[in-house]
Structure formats: C-alpha cells, structure tokens
Image (tube, grey):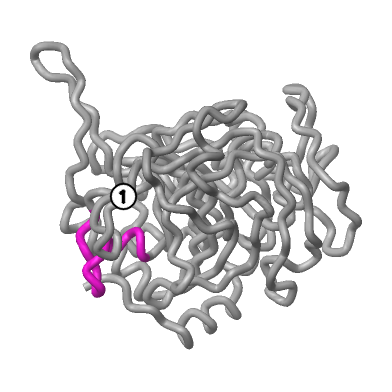
Amino acid sequence: MTNDNQKDGFSRRGIFGAVAGAAAVPLITNAVQGQGRGGVGGSPAANAPLSPTGAGVPLDSQAIVGNQGGGGPIRVLFISSYHPFDRENLFRMLDRFGTDITWCHVEHPAAERFFDPALAEDFDVYLFYDAFAGRKIVTGPDGRRQTTYPPPSAKLQADLKRLLTNGDKGFVMFHHALASWCHSWPAGVNGSNAYVEMMGGAADWGLDLANLRGVTYPRSGYRQGTEQRVTVVDRNHPVTAGVDDYDIVDETYLCPIFEDSVHPLLRTSFQPTADKFAHAPNGSNVGAGHPPGSNLVGWVKTAENTPVVYIQHGHDNNAWSNPHFQRLMLNAIKWAASPESKSWAKANAKRIFV
C-alpha cells in the first residue's frame, strides 16, 4: 500500500529527500498517510473506562486497526535499533493513535541523521524504542565478529546538543531505550555519560556500565513476564491523565535510575533486587553483585530545554495491548508535543552537555 499524499511536508518522498546524498542507511518505513479513522481501534477516549489488563494475544493480521501511519496532527518519528521486536503488533498500537498522530519509522544509524535540527523540522515528537545505539559489530578478515562501542561523531554530538537546546521537540522514550549510548557517549557537565543523564537511567544486560556518576554497575537485570501492580504517584500530570493504578504483565529491569534528576510518575509493586532476577521464570538475567534498584517505572524530566518522558513498559504485546499502557503512551506523546511541555522544560532547564 502506498500513498504519496503530503501533510506539512511529512511524507515518504519528503523524508527520503531529506537524507538524499547521505551515506547508505537502513530503510525508513511506514510514512503512509491515513484519511481518517480505520474500521476498528482508534486512540483511547479521554475518560473511557479501562479494563484491568491487556489480553496479550496476537492480533489478527487481517484486522484493520486504524490507518497505516495515522493521519493526526502530531508528527512522530519512531526510532528503533538492534533489539528485535514484534513489529506488526507494536505498529498496530501506534496506528490506533492515528487520529492524534502521524508517524513513521527509522532505524539506527539512519535515525542519527534526524538529530540534525534542519531535518527535525518535519517532526514534533521523537519516540525512542532503540537499544544499543552506538554499538558496532564488525567481522574481521578471520571471520570473527567483534563488538565495539565507538564514540559518537562530533557532528552527532553537536546535532543532539543543538536539538535539545532548541527545545522545540519532545522526546518520549520507552522500555529498552535505556540501553542506548550507555558506554561511549562523552561525559557531560557532571562528568557522567551525558546521554545517560539525558534519559535519567541506563541499562545493559551484557556488559557492566562504567562511569555513571563515578560508579561502575554490574550488567543489568531483566525479568520477563513479570506480574506487576503499578501505582500512579502523580495523578495531576498530563501523562497520567485518566490513568488509575493498574496491573500489567511485562518485562522489568534492575538497572541504575537517577531519581534525583527526574519527576516521578509511576512505581511498580515489584521490588527489583538481584535475587529475583537470577534464574527467574520466563527468562531472566542479572550481573552478580548488582545493588538493589529503583521501582520507579515512569518519569518526566528535562534535558537542556527539552521535555523528556520515560516509561519502562513495552516489551511485547502483553504491554502494547494493555489499555493503560496505550493511554500512557498517547498521553506522553501529546504532552511532549504541547506548548505546555516546552514552557515547563524551559522554565526547568537542565544542562546536560558540555
């Protein structure tokens, strides 16, 4: 299915034109324009009642769930990398928001082109689901594969700093986005990894995390299929509007989270300690000796002049089909795009980059 209709320059043709002449990059997908709400689905109504949990069952691939790419006024760039995920069901969730957002998808390293403020003009919100951005896997002459973490280019550093300092875009991050640029982004104003400080935490399930506020953390823990009761700790924030305490079955993490730099929104009943991540059911992992973690699973913060939202949920369709998670995600996108979030971020600016 293709559609070359344009809306404010936000189209497949416009996006590919923006990166013409750059190095070869992975495919950018799903810039299709919708013409209205699809047969079923649609974004959650503001005050509609929510069921306790999502069904978590695979969706019928023939079902119509909104128009591909949406047709709403908020222009969203969805960014992923490296970590595999069930694209069909996650993309269907985004399509459900199609009366509010128009979205397209780009993978690393192509995504890094769009940190250039000139190429950011076509978007209002950057939605991050990327893991291990910055990682390079190279096959040597002997056929062996080697993983390296080279530092970001000077241009990428300058572009991201300028984008965040401009403060005219919103950043929404969820789930394994905490695992990007955790090893090689240069230190910021407090001597710690500046990209990590932008996010408010970090995770890596294969390597130790070094130089995070002067501490080296053992590799992070993950625990899949974890039943949790989530408490909304700030019911007055626009991101949690219409969301009561809820149950969810999702992967959870044991990793460093810097609570002193964020405004808390959500806490889970699951207390992340190393013993609960060792040989747990449904898949788990943790580095030996990891200190107890935070049960904070949702927050907002500022990075330079930019509003940032992080929600830890989102491993698979158990989360994506949960109406509470859907409402949180749509609320986060709408708030991050709003003039109110930009005003709040500029009034509470947090210097991150040197």
Q: Would residue 24 be visible to someone looking at this image?
A: yes
Q: Which residues are magenta?
A: 185-197
Where is residue 332 drawn, in percent x and y?
63, 62
Taking the image as shown, residue 178 lies to the left or right of residue 44, namely left
Where is residue 319 drawn, in percent x and y?
68, 41
Front-most of residues 249 and 304:
249
The extreme right residue here reads: 49
- Say above or below: 166 vs 212: below
Front-most of residues 314 and 126:
314
Residue under pointer 1: 181
Front-most of residues 310 and 35:
310
Q: In the image, what residue occupies the spot 83% across and 63% down?
A: 46
Where is residue 100 drawn, in percent x and y?
70, 57
- Say above or below: 137 vs 184: above
Where is residue 39 drawn, in percent x and y?
84, 38
Front-most of residues 205 and 137:
205
- Say above or below: 163 vs 284: below
Taking the image as shown, residue 74 lies to the left or right of residue 107, namely right
Circle 1 Cα neighbour tier, 10 Å, few/some/many (<14 / 14–19 / ≥20): many
Q: How many marks?
A: 1
Hey, which quadrant is residue 41 in on the image?
A: top right
The extreme bottom residue here reads: 347
Hey, which quadrant is residue 214 in on the image?
A: bottom left
Residue type highlighted by circle 1: Trp
Quadrant where the N terminus lies?
top right
Instruction: Confirm whether the magenta stretch covers residue 353.
Output: no
